[in-house]
Image (cartoon, rainbow, N blue to C red):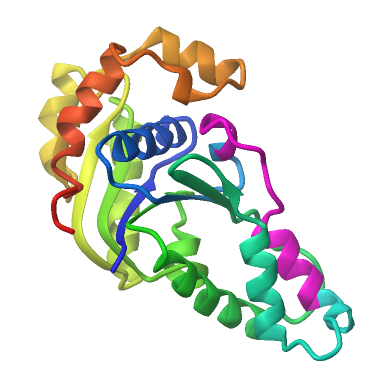
Amino acid sequence: MSYIIALAGKGGTGKTTIAALLARLLTENNCAPVLAVDADPNSNLAEALGLAQGTTIGSIVDEVAAHPESIPSGMTKDRFVEYRVQSAVSEGRGIDCLSMGRSEGPGCYCYVNNCLRSVMEDLIRDYRYVIIDNEAGLEHLSRRTTRRADALVVVADATSSGLKAASRISDLARELKIDIKNAYLLINRGITDQAMSKIKDVKLDYLGCLPFDQTVEVISRNGGSLMELQDSAPVLGALRQLGEKIWFCSRQ
């Protein structure tokens, strides 16, 4: 069974960067194949991984829901959705990426979404590790992608609002009854003594803190690939140590 690592956090916390770096570290630790799922419509996970942006699942669902007549003769809706999802995967060296996007068009979505979840569950089984970059609302964990995670990593900044947002995400995960084995809080871009004193109020296991890394900020701002980041980068060194707490490369 695939080991699923789900990341969540409010916008601007750097969770897409962390998702990309986790995927990189997993491949470096011989944990391939890895599937990176971009489940936040506002992120650019494929770009951060140095992969071409494929067709989003949202656009596929829109097409099938609004124009069921477009399904080729002799092909079931389930099979057509499966074919389109598989063709939407951007393939890399040890890391593949799938962008979920958002469905907003007209049409009946109930059946298509049920079909999508089944297709996603089958797709996930083909990978040793799956990293899901979620939006704060956890839509794809609750409804469309999978309802389980071996590790939920909530990324926050060292501000009062950041920690409150992390608490809300933790509460939401419990309300949605998502099957989560371990839930962690990860502080990004440094921490303050004041923030450390408030971490105990967040109902998540404190994983640790990643340092601010100017090189990462420049790469992200310029739309570059984090696969090009030097091995000696401080954020990579810190994430290597913390990552060992959430993945188990020797388990298979």
Question: Which residue is at the front of the view, 151 or 96?
Answer: 96
**Residue 164 found in image quarter:** top left
Question: Which residue is at the front of the view, 189 or 126?
Answer: 126
Name the residue furthest top: 214
**Which image quarter holds the N terminus?**
bottom left
Question: Residue 239: horizontal and vertical position, in percent?
Answer: 24, 28
75 sits left or right of 164 in the view: right
The stretch of residues the image draws in magenta is: 46-65
Question: Residue 77: horizontal and vertical position, in percent?
Answer: 72, 85
What residue is drawn where x is 29% and y is 19%?
235
In the image, residue 9 sits, relative to residue 88, either above or below, namely above
| Count of all numbered marks drawn on residues in the image | 0
Question: Which residue is at the front of the view, 215 or 248?
Answer: 248
Residue 39 shows in this picture: no
110 sits left or right of 93 in the view: right
**Which image quarter holds the C terminus?**
bottom left
Secondary structure mostly seen in the magenta stretch = helix
What residue is drawn where x is 35% and y is 47%?
32
Question: Which residue is at the front of the view, 191 or 42?
Answer: 42
What residue is drawn where x is 49% and y is 62%?
139
Judge whether residue 61 is colored magenta: yes
What residue is drawn where x is 28% and y is 11%?
232
Question: Residue 72: horizontal and vertical position, in percent?
Answer: 85, 82
In the image, residue 27 sits, relative to residue 77, either above or below, namely above
Question: Residue 135: horizontal and vertical position, in percent?
Answer: 49, 49
178 sits left or right of 122 in the view: left
In the image, residue 65 sits, relative to residue 233, either above or below, namely below
Residue 34 shows in this picture: yes
Judge whether residue 60 is colored magenta: yes
41 sits left or right of 139 in the view: right
